Image: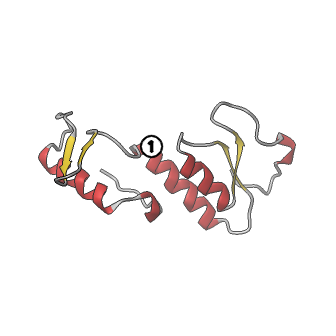
Amino acid sequence: MRSFSIPPHYRSNLIGRLKAFRKVQDPKKKDLTPTLLDLGAVRFILARHFGFCYGVENAIEISYKALEENPGKRIFLLSQMIHNPAVNDDLPARGMRFIQDTQGRMQMDWSELSANDVG
């Protein structure tokens, strides 16, 4: 399966290792039992499937690539791409703008867009 280049702050070495371990145990993801991480005094029970899905990782990669490839240009997305406040706050901090939120409420007026904008 394709892997995506997303910012390292969206990844966790521990979670990556847990997912890799489960992938070896159950490559077809048929076992839906949670993963138990037992640290003695503390036990963590992690859902079998969690984290960003294929489509979200793809969207994040495309967004960051657009920012990287278009320095100094105004870049817009129709809406926030996922229901994740960290991503939806990080992209505007890097210069991307959302035309509307995930509920379809306008964040700006259409007239603000120009032919020179990237979207």
| Residue 16: percent from left, percent from top | 29, 57
User: Which amino acid is tagged 1?
Assistant: Gly
Is 19 positioned to the left or the right of 119 in the image? left
Front residue of this view, candidates 42 and 118: 42
| Residue 97: percent from left, percent from top | 71, 51
Give above or below for 43 relative to 67: above
Front residue of this view, candidates 72 and 92: 92
| Residue 113: percent from left, percent from top | 81, 48
- Label 1 neighbour load within 10 Å: few <14, some 14-19, many 20+: few
| Residue 61: percent from left, percent from top | 50, 56
Image coloring type: secondary structure
Q: Please name the residue that numbered disc 1 is placed on.
A: 55
Front residue of this view, candidates 69 and 91: 91
- Outermost residue toward the front? 41
Is 110 positioned to the left or the right of 54 in the image? right
Taking the spot 62% from the left edge, 43% from the top edge, the residue there is 80
- Outermost residue toward the left? 25
Give above or below for 71 relative to 46: below
Q: Tag 1, which secondary structure?
A: helix
